[in-house]
Amino acid sequence: MKKKLKKIVLAYSGGLDTSVIIPWLKENYDNPEIVCVCANVGQDDEIEGLEERAKKSGASKLYIEDLTEEFVNDFIIPTVKAGADYEGYLLGTSFARPIIGKRLVEIAKKEKADAICHGCTGKGNDQVRFELAVMHFAPEMKIIAPWREWDIVSRDQEIDYAEAHKIPLKISRETNYSKDKNLWHLSHEGLDMEDPGNEPQLEKKGFLEMSVSPLKAPNKPTYVTLSFEKGIPVKLDGKKMTATQIIRKLNKLGGENGIGILDLVENRLVGMKSRGVYETPGGTILYRAHEVLETICLDKLTSHKKRELAITFADLVYNGQWFTPLREALSAFVDATQERVTGDVKLKLYKGNIMNAGVWSPYSLYSEEIATFDEGGDYRQDDASGFIHLFGLPTKVQAMLDGTKAKKKAPCKKRCGKRD
């Protein structure tokens, strides 16, 4: 089978894994042509010099595909509207994989490739996410996952392999964290963080890239106002922007104020727990603003059911099941709930914290006239007596029944110990 593969399309980031994979494929698959695909989902600063590195590693060509707008509009915003997070994690890597997998298939078909290859480890979630996307768009396509085949067992051994093959790398053994970056977030895994007893070195120079430690944030707060239309962010501080532009600006503001740093031990899809540190400055602000707006725009039943389904939505995204009927159905439900989620939210950012500073909507269900402690409005306090009576009636009946049974089971006072 290996000898039949003449051309392989590789999901390429220029990092350690994918750099090593190119020569490994050529050595172990009878020297096929390697076509690299880099999907730009907002990690613009990591693309410089990528083509030169790919070709020096043995690739014949490199596609750099700018998918940022599609990523934001078709993946990020639907997830924000759903209010979905996985155990606190805002799904930065998770919802980037389906769009990359989709583009890999499109280029593989264009190039008439025999297989698609990725650099995900056999311990991670991304292998599932990539491969489910490929299965959806090209169920007949062969998938190669070197981490499930080769004899390399650690990132140190990968570096040894790269040095032996004179492969250019941007990392060293000391900075060899496993990272993933896009417009939405940056993740850090490995090295000292594999022990959850170790405090992450947030103040160490070079560790954080999108943010500063809250300890180094300014001593005065920053205010931001976000405007939404049907759950979609459309303005920042009164200025109309695209969702992508808003996220970029929020990344800057949030990063400067130490917002959105998450140290998490999560439950991976493959069955283990893993520890990582995530930087999601703009996304954390956007989630909070959207959540605050929904508090005045959604009725109780819709809000509670939406929160329940957000867990399912997050599981689907985390597990790589974006291209499924259930995810599409949930998105249709979410879109229906967002019809009146329109308005403005003001937030105060301060040393890693986000505080509410005001919310307004033309569709607000909050009535100051009804909620006030002063007299007035359509709410009559004496109506609460009848409401409590009927609402508590099942509780009262159950208590009466339990009391009757307890009396029947009471022990006899006679010495014989018999019951009445």
Image: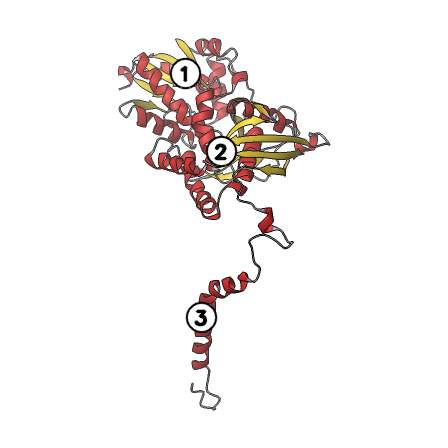
Residue at 44% across / 70% down in the picture?
397
Kind of residue at disc 3: Val
Q: Left or right: where does residue 131 sit relative to residue 204?
A: left
Place of residue 75 in the rendered image (x, y in percent of width and height, measured from the top left): 44, 28
Disc 3 on helix, strand or loop?
A: helix
Whether residue 21 is visible to the viewer of this picture, yes or no, is yes
Image mark count: 3
Kind of residue at disc 2: Gly
Give the residue at mark 1. 37
| Distance from Cα at disc 1 to Cα at disc 2 | 33 Å
Residue nearer the viewer, 377 or 21: 377
Query: In which quadrant is the C terminus drawn?
Result: bottom left
Give the residue at mark 3. 397
Earlier sequence position, callout 3 versus callout 1: 1
Residue nearer the viewer, 132 or 151: 132
Compared with 183, 265 (above or below) is: below
